[in-house]
Structures are given as structure tokens and as C-alpha cells.
């Protein structure tokens, strides 16, 4: 750790015991930090990010179970927790496990047992098991793989990697990415005895952002047949892509590509095992790179057709008043051709970034949104997203701004909200203020999108002085379980009230999230709980949770409540 001491946070309301435990830890050259309440311990965990937490269960205020559950979110999610408690019943151990604890020590305990548990948990957390998937790491299975290689002289290697997770993390946060890895890890483990025979299966291990499956030769010969290996590779790839589509993509509204490479690992007295294993992995990745190159060439040609033929359409998602579910407007979301691999916006913009053509795509999406918004009744707000890289640039931004102004009917400009995503680096604030002032002069309103998940943060809010702030869906997800997210949203709510900014929560999917937002006094929201993006017709004045319509929209010219 480059000379950095391992920090261990001890949370226990027994001051004397806390002091004794800290002394024992410091005698082993750990840095010990003490807290005598759950609330204080959480504050320290969020600000100092210890490597391990020793946590008492029975404390006044927040008990250990509550503290442990709070630690499962945000930047503290990877910190292992060891419970210290006098409760030794099975039910207590099960509750500790459900809360996310890594180990359990009953009081009274010997100092040596405590220290050994600390060493074991720190070692296992960092070396032997991946904290996201729970799968063993390569270090954990290496001995078994080496033994099987000695028995068979040759093994098969399947290397599974994912594309698109970086974009997904930027859009929806690390929790969505973690969920992708958990699904793939679980499904890989389930291939044993189904897609892959038990006797052929050696191990599956996590490599952080990839997976490694090791296979034995078929029973009737002592070598790995390449055709058999390719067949297993194709079947595995097809199955995993199906799981991604069924379990994740429809929920996440994002596309993740999966590739499986294959190679053979041979035994040689002249080559060290680890070097041979790394060479086999490298060989598998070369096959993936070739396959990826072919896919990129195909998508590049498809992208060119989308741009040249203006094959962008818009779908609509309602934004409602959370107190009575009145629809106040719609966000217009771009989509590629329906049956195309570039139908999803994340796939479209991923190719655009690779082709260095984001401004071109963003312009097309923006123009299509301006035209599509004209079909909505005038009473509704229309929210249109934009990439700062295009609209706020000095080189072509002036033309892009004027083009968008001209494309929007004058009578609709006051009902049009330009969303500027916070999930991008803005390094020219004077020019951004100039662009925002131009839009406002023409009647447009301004929103900051993805607030709480991007780079610009409070400075963007101060510089733009937006009319709306849209909370990123990563803050809405599991809101009802996270005290940290509730406090953060409460702080933003107070700021918005004082600055007279409307606050909109994105990504509402459950009634529990809705109840938490209502308890926090959030006025507006959107998400799958009300409607998936699609056609807004027939328009409804009110949409209840679950997407049920409550009333038809007013006739053109009639006011819309809220």
C-alpha cells in the first residue's frame, strides 16, 4: 500500500472496550479510529474511508445492522465489516449476513482471535474473492488450475469481457454496473453441469472487469479440441447475451456488449505456469479484438446511414407532479432505427464517440426533438437533452444554437427546457453563460440533468442558475434504504427552494422510492413507475403510479394543472 497504514474503524458504544481494541490494533501497526455511536461511525466511514470496520451490534440510536446496511451504498460499499457482539444465536448471525457483514466475533473474545479475524478478512477481501460477484479470483484458483494442467497437459481457456460498462457507469452509476457483473458471474457459475459438463469444468474466476473459465479436455482424448472449444465459446456467448437482454437491458435501458475469447493452455517444463497462463489469456483477447474490430466496422457503416438519412426518431417520457401525478411535460428522448443495433441512444452515442462525431449526432437529435416537440399541446413543457461538447463549444456552437432557436416555433420556446447534462466536463464557463443567456433571451428555460453524478457539480448550478435541476437516477435507486442519499437530496431540495429552482427526481421505479421522495418533499419526478419512454398519445392529464391513466388531457388551449 505504498507505506500507507491500514485504517480500521472501531464502532462501539462501550468506550473502554473501544479503547482496548484500538490499542490491540495499533500494536500490530494498524491505524485505529474510534467512534462511540453508529451515526458518528458512519460520518467517519464516509469521510475517511477505512479499510475495515469493526462494528458493535447493540448500540443506542442506530444499531449495528442499520449501520452495516448504510455502508453498502456509495464509496463505502467495498469496505468489509466484522460484527462484534454478545449475541450468538443463529438468527443474529443470519441478520448479520443479510446486512452485509464479512465476519462475526462474539463477545467476550481473545485479542489474538480478533487480530486473526482482521488479518483473514483483509486478506480474503483483497486477494481471494471478488467483492462484487463473490467469485474466486485468479489467485484463489491458480493452484487448482496448475494441478489440473499437470494431470491433463492441456486445458481450455474462455475469457469473458464486457463492453459498454464505462458508459453505463457514467449514465446510471456503479450500482448498475455491479449488477451487470453479478448477473454474468452468477450465470457463468451456473454453466457447470448444464452448458459445460461437471467433469470438464475446472473453475470460473473474476478478473475485476472480466471472467476466466478453465476447462479440462474431453474424456476420450487428452488434448483440447479447438472445434469443441469454439463450439462451447459460441454457446456461452449466446447464452450470456440472452441473459443480459432478459435480465438487465430492458430494466437499465442500456446496452452492454459481451465477448468471449478462447485459447488453449499447454504445459511445458521450460515455461513458468503463470507466464503460460497470461499468454493464453492474451491469445484469447486477440480473438476478441478481431471480433470487436469486425463489429465496429459494421456499426460504423450503420451509423453513417443513420446520420446521412436522418434516421432519428423521438420517444416521450412524462414528468409528473408527485403529489397528485399531474403531467407537467415530457422529456423527448432520441432513438435510432427500430430494428437496428443502434436503436438505443447509448449505443448510438458510443459509436459516435468512437467515430469522433458526437456533435453531428447531437445536432441531429436536437433538431428532431425540436420538430417532434411541436406535436405536443402547447400547455406541456418539453425537455430536450443536449451534449455540452456541441452546443457550448466556441467553434461550432454559435451556429448550433441559432439553428436550434430557428427550428423551435416562437410560441413554444417558453415551454422548451434545454437540459445540459452534468455528466460532462465543462471547462469554459464564460462561454457557457453566454450560450445560456442567448437561449433565455429567446424564451427557453434551462435544466441541469444528471445532478449528483457528474463532474461539474455545484459550480455548474451556480454558473447557469437553472430553472430545473434533475436528480440523477443513481440517487433515486435504493433511496428508501440509504440515509446518505436522503440527506444529500434533502440538501439539494433546500438549496432549490431558496434559489427558486424546480427539482425533478429521475429514475423512479418503485412505490418505495416514490414514498421516500414524497417524504423528502420532492415536487416532480419521472421514471418507469409512471411510464416507459414511448408515444405520448393518447395524452393523459394524470398518470398514476404503475402507468395507469387517470384522465384524458385537456383540449388544446385549456390550462394544465401544476
Image: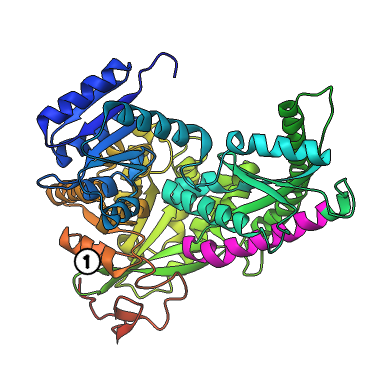
Q: Position of residue 355 (x, y in %)?
A: 65, 43
Query: Which residue is nearer to you in this view: 321 or 442?
Result: 321
Q: Quadrant location of the C terminus?
A: bottom left
Kindly report the secondary structure that dominates the magenta region of the rendered protein: helix
Q: Quadrant location of the N terminus?
A: top left
Q: Position of residue 75 (x, y in %)?
A: 35, 39
Left or right, 418 with reference to 253: left
At 28% across and 63% down in the image, what residue appears?
513
Left or right, 447 with reference to 426: left
- Whether residue 287 appears in magenta in the rendering, the answer is no
Mark 1 neighbour density, 10 Å: few (under 14) some (14–19) many (20 or more) = some
- Whether residue 242 appears in magenta in the rendering, the answer is yes
At 31% across and 25% down in the image, what residue appears?
7
| Magenta-highlighted residues | 229-252
Q: Secondary structure at mark 1?
A: helix
Q: In the displayed orientation, state which residue is furthest to the top.
A: 3
Q: How many marks?
A: 1
* Image position of 368 with respect to 36: above or below: below
Color theme of the render: rainbow
Residue 495: tell me if it is visible.
Answer: yes
Left or right, 244 with reference to 499: right
- According to the image, label 1 marks what residue? 515
Q: Position of residue 166 (x, y in %)?
A: 53, 44
Left or right, 386 with reference to 530: right
At 62% across and 69% down in the image, what residue appears?
338
Query: Which residue is nearer to you in this view: 19 or 3?
Result: 19
* Image position of 144 with respect to 173: above or below: above
Tell me which corner region of the image, top left, top right, bottom left or bottom right, holds residue 49: top left
Tell me which corner region of the image, top left, top right, bottom left or bottom right, holds residue 325: bottom left
Q: Position of residue 537 (x, y in %)?
A: 42, 81
Amino acid at each position: 500500500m505504498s507505506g500507507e497504514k491500514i485504517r480500521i474503524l472501531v464502532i462501539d458504544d462501550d468506550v473502554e472496550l473501544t479503547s482496548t481494541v484500538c490499542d490491540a490494533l495499533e500494536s500490530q501497526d494498524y491505524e485505529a479510529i474510534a467512534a462511540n455511536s453508529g451515526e458518528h461511525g458512519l460520518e467517519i466511514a464516509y469521510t475517511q474511508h477505512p479499510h475495515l470496520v469493526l462494528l458493535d451490534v447493540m448500540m443506542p440510536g442506530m444499531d449495528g445492522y442499520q449501520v452495516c446496511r448504510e455502508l453498502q451504498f456509495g464509496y463505502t460499499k467495498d469496505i468489509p465489516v466484522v460484527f462484534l457482539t454478545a449475541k450468538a444465536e443463529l438468527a443474529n448471525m443470519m441478520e448479520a449476513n443479510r446486512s452485509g457483514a464479512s465476519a462475526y466475533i462474539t463477545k467476550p473474545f481473545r485479542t489474538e482471535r480478533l487480530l486473526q479475524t482482521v488479518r483473514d478478512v483483509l486478506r480474503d477481501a483483497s486477494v481471494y474473492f471478488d467483492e462484487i460477484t463473490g467469485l474466486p479470483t485468479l489467485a484463489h484458483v491458480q493452484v487448482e488450475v496448475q494441478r489440473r494442467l499437470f494431470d491433463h497437459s492441456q486445458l481450455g481457456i474462455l475469457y469473458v469481457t464486457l463492453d459498454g460498462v464505462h458508459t453505463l457507469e457514467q449514465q446510471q452509476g456503479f450500482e448498475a454496473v455491479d449488477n451487470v457483473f453479478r448477473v454474468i458471474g452468477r450465470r457463468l457459475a451456473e454453466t457447470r453441469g448444464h452448458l459445460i459438463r461437471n467433469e470438464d469444468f475446472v473453475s470460473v474466476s473474476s478478473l475485476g472487469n472480466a471472467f476466466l473459465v478453465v476447462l479440462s479436455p474431453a474424456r476420450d482424448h487428452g488434448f483440447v479440441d479447438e472445434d469443441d472449444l469454439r463450439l462451447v465459446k459460441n454457446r456461452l456467448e449466446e447464452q450470456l447475451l440472452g441473459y443480459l437482454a432478459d435480465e438487465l437491458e430492458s430494466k437499465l435501458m442500456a446496452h452492454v456488449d459481451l465477448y468471449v475469447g478462447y485459447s488453449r493452455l499447454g504445459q511445458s517444463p521450460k515455461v513458468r505456469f503463470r507466464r503460460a497462463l497470461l499468454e493464453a489469456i492474451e491469445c484469447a483477447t486477440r480473438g476478441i479484438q478481431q471480433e470487436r474490430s469486425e463489429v465496429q466496422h459494421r456499426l460504423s457503416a450503420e451509423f453513417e446511414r443513420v446520420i446521412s438519412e436522418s434516421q432519428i426518431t423521438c420517444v416521450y417520457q412524462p414528468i409528473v407532479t408527485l403529489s397528485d401525478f399531474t403531467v407537467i411535460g415530457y422529456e423527448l428522448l432520441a432513438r435510432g432505427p427500430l430494428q437496428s443495433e443502434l436503436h438505443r441512444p447509448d449505443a448510438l452515442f458510443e459509436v459516435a464517440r468512437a467515430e469522433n462525431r458526437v456533435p453531428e449526432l447531437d445536432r441531429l437529435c436536437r433538431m428532431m426533438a425540436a420538430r417532434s416537440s411541436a406535436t405536443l399541446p402547447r400547455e406541456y413543457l418539453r425537455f430536450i437533452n443536449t451534449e455540452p461538447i456541441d452546443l457550448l463549444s466556441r467553434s461550432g456552437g454559435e451556429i448550433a444554437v441559432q439553428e436550434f432557436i430557428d427550428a423551435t416555433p416562437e410560441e413554444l420556446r417558453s415551454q422548451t427546457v434545454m437540459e445540459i447534462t452534468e455528466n460532462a466536463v465543462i471547462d469554459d464557463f464564460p462561454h457557457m453563460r453566454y450560450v445560456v443567456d442567448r437561449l433565455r433571451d429567446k424564451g427557453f428555460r434551462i435544466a441541469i440533468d444528471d445532478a449528483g453524478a457528474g463532474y461539474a457539480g455545484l459550480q455548474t448550478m451556480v454558473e447557469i442558475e437553472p430553472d430545473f435541476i434533475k436528480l440523477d437516477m443513481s440517487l433515486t435507486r435504493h433511496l428508501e434504504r440509504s440515509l446518505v442519499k436522503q440527506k444529500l437530496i434533502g440538501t439539494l431540495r433546500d438549496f432549490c427552494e431558496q434559489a427558486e429552482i424546480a427539482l425533478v427526481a429521475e429514475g423512479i421505479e418503485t412505490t418505495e422510492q416514490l414514498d421516500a421522495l414524497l417524504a423528502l418533499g420532492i415536487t416532480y419526478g419521472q421514471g418507469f413507475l409512471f411510464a416507459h419512454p414511448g408515444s405520448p398519445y393518447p395524452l393523459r392529464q394524470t398518470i398514476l403510479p404503475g402507468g395507469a391513466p387517470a384522465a384524458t388531457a385537456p383540449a388544446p388551449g385549456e390550462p394544465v394543472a401544476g
